[in-house]
Image: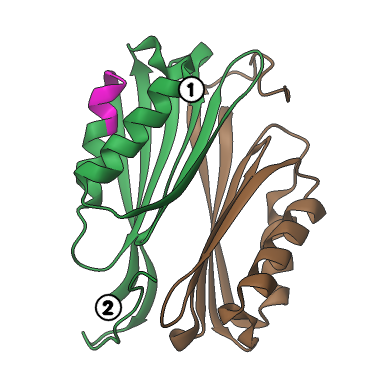
Chain colours: A brown, B green
Amino acid sequence: MHALGTHLLVDLKDCQNDGLNDIQFVQEAMLSAARDAQATIVDFKFHEFSPFGISGVVVIAESHLAIHTWPEYKYAAVDVFTCGDTLQPEVAAIALAKAFASRNPSIHEVKRGIIGIDNIHRPHKSED
Amino acid sequence: MHALGTHLLVDLKDCQNDGLNDIQFVQEAMLSAARDAQATIVDFKFHEFSPFGISGVVVIAESHLAIHTWPEYKYAAVDVFTCGDTLQPEVAAIALAKAFASRNPSIHEVKRGIIGIDNIHRPHKSED
């Protein structure tokens, strides 16, 4: 079975790290997690909300990472979407669970774009 | 039951519109879909891959939209992640299915950040 993308839906509950409301901390944790997973970072954008909450996305050559934090609930919703065979998206997920000291993390893996039941696929997504 | 976010995983298969490989078309379709859903666009980033494929994210005040296209498979993976009660994420999903003329769209809705079984929640995510 060939899926074009692997998408991890990562829910980080009961986060003990106040960095959840620190845009610099969140950004560095996300970029570090992307690097840990061997991703090629293309661009990123983080935004701080009032009174609290950070949203951020990291565009990688292999798809994207996204995060939304709710510090008032000690919760962050993370997505790690990758394509290709070289990345290990779970490495990024685990790195973020550790960074925010989540006492109750969960990961759901979704295969996106199941094209066929054979393993033939064309090359794709080489960087410019 | 109170969920902090609603996340639509939208798979657009058998897309009949060649715009899937046109960065300007993809960007405009995504921004238009965000506006259709009454989202407040904060920022966006789109990237074109070689030999083909577009990735893009739209950061909205209410979370994000993301897209990855595989023109060679006539496929796009779309995510519409929203928080709050005012947006209609399915409006964005349907707008994108139409924009790319998908003959085989599917939508999976995931509730992210289920905090409690009551309906009490604090205000969050007002724009700066």
Q: Quadrant of the C terminus of chain A?
A: top right
Q: Is residue B83 above or below residue A52?
A: above
Specify the amino acid type for callout 2: His
User: Mark 2 highlights which residue?
Assistant: B2
Quadrant where the N terminus of chain A is found in the figure: top right
Residue B32, image x, y percentages: 28, 36
The stretch drawn in magenta includes residue B12: no
Question: Residue A24: which numbered mark, if any?
Answer: none
Determine if residue A68 is in view: no
Query: Amino acid type of disc 1?
Result: Ile
Disc 2 and disc 1 in contact, CB within 8 angstroms: no
- Residue B8: x and y in percent read 34, 49
Q: Residue at x 65, y 86 (%)?
A: A17
Whether discs 2 and 1 lie on one chain: the answer is yes
Marked residue chain, label 2: B
Does residue B25 appear to the left or right of A39 in the view shown? left
Q: Name the residue located 41 percent from the left edge and 26 percent from the top edge.
A: B26
Residues under labels 2 and 1: Cα distance? 37 Å
Q: Which residue is mark 1?
A: B23
Q: Residue at x 76, y 40 (%)?
A: A40
Q: Find the magenta span and give its range.
A: B96-103
Image quarter for residue B48?
A: top right
Mark 2 vs mark 1: which is more N-terminal?
2
Residue A42 in the image: above or below residue B37: above
Q: Which is nearer the eye, B56 or A83?
A: B56
- Neighbourhood count class around disc 1 (C-alpha, 10 Å): few under 14, some 14–19, many 20 upward: some
Q: How many marks?
A: 2
